[in-house]
Amino acid sequence: MKKLKPDHKGKAVYLSAPVNALVQGYYEQNTTIAEIKEHGDFGLGTFNDLDGEMVILDNIVYQVKDDGMAYPVGDDKETPFACLTFFTPDTVEEINGERLDVPLEELLNLLIPSANMLYAIRIDGEFKYIKTRSVPRQENYRPLVEVAREQPTFEYHEIKGTLGGFYTPQFMASLNVPGYHLHFMNEDRTRGGHMLECEFKEITVGLQHVPRLEVGLPLTIDYLTADLTEDTRRDLEEAEH
Ligand SMILES: [Zn+2]
């Protein structure tokens, strides 16, 4: 089943900061949840002091703490990095038949028409297996790749829920996590995290192409004086997969 709803002129994927600052350990910015919600009702990110994973679904912002439990958060919390858009899918497809046996990344590669476009992706349904991680609260300036080496991970079997996130072209790697970046929430929105592995059963995939990127540059002394000339792609690859 395919539904077409092609009207999001002017819509953008919004980043509250370039991801390379986060990768280098800049975990405190003065951007509030209220501010980022002006730019979307769907997305992901983290919180100041790298205090857990952020998942935004249906305009509710959740914080997944380092025990894997999720809590809705208020508008005054702050984030060093978040990525959002207003989600209105171009297509919603039920996955069945032979495509049920395809690994998730391959399936998404088949569904997205171009590797050079930004896409928002929402997957609802039942999963055979999901492995997630969350990040524990950190001191500022500790590189993300070091933190990620000690991340707590969580495994779920036969679980219903939602994956939400983005596809970003490789050439935008200093601004956003390149490739697929998906965060998970279970059906009753009590557990979740950054998706590391996934085997799906019955799912629908909502896809929205977004032909514009908007990047906020934080007005903090920390950000303004940071040395962001380093190529962080390798660290990002290790930290996010
Ligand atoms: Zn993530």
Image (tube, rainbow, N blue to C red):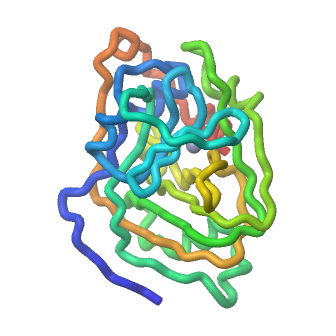
Asked if residue 26 is positioned above or below residue 195 in the image, the reply reads: above
**For residue 51, side relative to residue 75 (left or right):** right
Residue shown at 64%/34% (left/top)?
65
Q: Quadrant of ligand 1?
A: top right
Q: Report x, y in % for residue 120.
A: 42, 60
Q: Report x, y in % for residue 77.
A: 42, 27
Asked if residue 27 is positioned above or below residue 86 in the image, the reply reads: above
Asked if residue 51 is positioned above or below residue 101 in the image, the reply reads: above
Q: Quadrant of residue 161?
A: bottom right
Q: How many marks?
A: 0
Residue shown at 75%/30% (left/top)?
149
**For residue 107, side relative to residue 218 (left or right):** right
**Residue farthest toward the left in the current orientation of the protein:** 10
Q: Quadrant of the C terminus?
A: top right
Q: Report x, y in % for residue 52.
A: 60, 33
Which one is nearer the viewer's eye here, 231 or 190?
A: 190
**For residue 78, side relative to residue 241 (left or right):** left
**For residue 109, side relative to residue 41 (left or right):** right
Which one is nearer the viewer's eye here, 71 or 210?
A: 71
Residue shown at 43%/21% (left/top)?
229
Q: Quadrant of residue 159?
A: bottom right
Q: Report x, y in % for residue 75.
A: 37, 34
Residue shown at 52%/34% (left/top)?
46
